[in-house]
Each structure stands twice: as C-alpha cells, then as structure tokens.
Amino acid sequence: MTNTLLRSIRERILDESEPLDGLLRKCLLLGAETGSNALRDWARSELNGYSSDESIPEYRVLPTPPIVMSSVSGNYLSKGQHLHRFELPAKASEVIPDQFHITQPIGELEQISTSKSVSFIAPELNLAKIIWNRSLDSDFQQILDLSYTIAGSTLAGVMSKVRTQLVEIIADLSSDIPLDELPKKAQVDSAVSQRIGTQYNTTIHATHGSTAIGNKAQATINGITIEEAIQLLDAARSIASDKVADDEDKAELLEAIEELRTVVSQPAPDTGHVVKEVGKLRKIAERIGGAALIAAVDGSASALMELAMSGAFG
C-alpha cells in the first residue's frame, strides 16, 4: 500500500468531487508511512480543527467579520443590525480583535459553508456587550446580543485554499519522486514547511459557541485569558453593587462572585470547583433577574466555563 499511496493521492486530488477529508486522511497515512510528523500534524488539525495551543495557517485567518446586534430601546426591539467593529463605542471596540480565525474541522466547514451566512459568538463579544451596556441608560436601552456573521461562500473559500495547499504539497513530492516510491521524511517535511508557511498561535471561534484549549494562566479563548475573565467577573460585581436593590440578594450575589473569583485566582484552580461555582452564580443571577445583571454575569460565566472545559485549569 505504501508504494501506491502517493500515486493514489495524486490521481484523486484534482477531482473536485473527491471529498477533502478523505484526501487528508490519506495524508495522515502518508505522514505515518514516511515518518513525517509535520504532514500528520497538519492533516490531523485540518480534520479535527485547530486548538489554541496549536498554530494556524494564514489561509484560515480572515479580517474581523461584521457584527450583528440585537437591542432594545424603550418598547422597540431591533434585530439583525449589521455593524463594523469600529461602529461600536470606542471602549467596546477595543476588545474586538482585527482578525478572525477559522478553526473548525474540514467536515464542519463543509456543512456550514452551504449556508448563506453563519453566526458565531465569542467571549470578546460578551465583554463588548457589557462595556457598551454600562454606557447606556439601562432602563430604556439594552444591547441584547452581539454575534459575528460570515458568508458561507467565504468558508467555502477557506476549504478551497486547504485543497490548494494539499495540491501544492503533493505536486512538490511527486515532481522529483517516482509515484511508486515512498518519499523520504525530509522531503515531506520540507514540502509541508514550504507550502504551509510560517504559523502563529491562535484561538478557536466556534459556531454558536466558543471553545479553546490552553495551558493554565496562559490559556485563551478568542484572545481572552484567565486574568481577563476575572476582569469580566469584577465588572459583574460592580454592576451587582449598583443594580441590585434588595440587600439580601445583593449580599448573596456578591458572596457568590467573590467565592468564584477566589477559586479561579488560585495557582491551579480545580476544574470541577470552577464549574460548580459558575453554576451557583448563574442560578443566583437568574433568580434576581435584570437584563444588565444577567448579561454581566453571563459574560464572565461563559468565559470561565469555556476555559474550564478546554483544560485551562487543573
């Protein structure tokens, strides 16, 4: 099989109807047969998606897409308003990065690229929402939701670039090597390095949610670190102090916030403990109610939950 693997990939790679994930699985095998971890790692990341402790190729990096806003002003509810990030208030726009990273697996991209548009949410949008709402008269105005939107055709374009990279790699390997021979490890590594190019660390943006994998305090979700998640928690505490009228409710809520803050501020927070305290805080906020309070708590809780689920804590 190893003697025909390069030929098999080359014969199928220019067939646009050939599933891209199948070709990438062949690359996994080719990397294993040649001992090229570079090819295996690239193919595996394309198949499984990129995590925040990996590096991401430039063809998966886009300018920050339009932001879609839902808001309420008095009795008027507005949905689907498209904004550029610089149309947000200055302090809110500062937390929105100027790049967006497409990190989904090829299989998922194939599915969602058939849609006219796809919505993405991310923790920095929760932070921007909190900052924006704090500048508004919350009795009459409220930002309810912020999300990114990307055309399905843009995602299809990313997939096309993945296929092009694969063609380039196989073309490099087959130009000097007979198709019935197995390339040397050094040849495969060189082809991957040349075609994929310089990469850099990134984070994941996921459709209708956010995921990331990081390492302790250096972990990020879409650029948000543990320290920044704690800042979100501090913002929630400030809003709780200002907006909660009932003294008993306020005391209970502030105590829950402080307990969660203490847990996540430890050198090696326990994931289970973080999840438990986040759930407790959310229940209290939902019981007390209030759009500004729930939005603030949700922003910090969502960021901490994503960090917890991605392995950022102990």
Image: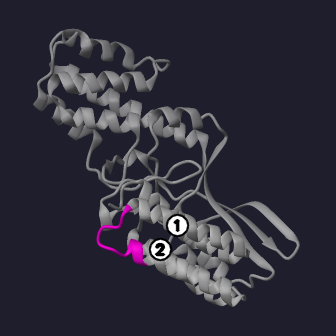
Nearer the observer, 269 or 221: 269
Q: For the residue marked with disc 1, what is the amino acid?
A: Val
Q: Residue at x 54, y 63 (%)?
A: 302
Q: What is the secondary structure assignment of the residue under circle 2?
A: helix
Of labels 1 and 2, earlier in sequence is 2
Mark 2 — residue?
A: 260
Q: Position of residue 51 (x, y in %)?
A: 37, 49
User: What separation in Å lies between label 1 and label 2 (alpha carbons)?
Assistant: 7 Å
Specify whether 261 is left or right of 251: left
Q: Residue at x 49, y 81 (%)?
A: 258
- Asked which quadrant contains residue 130, the reply is bottom right
The secondary structure making up most of the magenta span is: loop
Disc assigned to residue 193: none
Give the magenta-colored segment's residue range: 262-270
Specify whether 305 is left or right of 225: right
Nearer the observer, 205 or 288: 288
Nearer the observer, 197 or 55: 55
Quadrant containing the C terminus is: bottom left
Q: For the residue marked with disc 2, what is the amino acid?
A: Leu
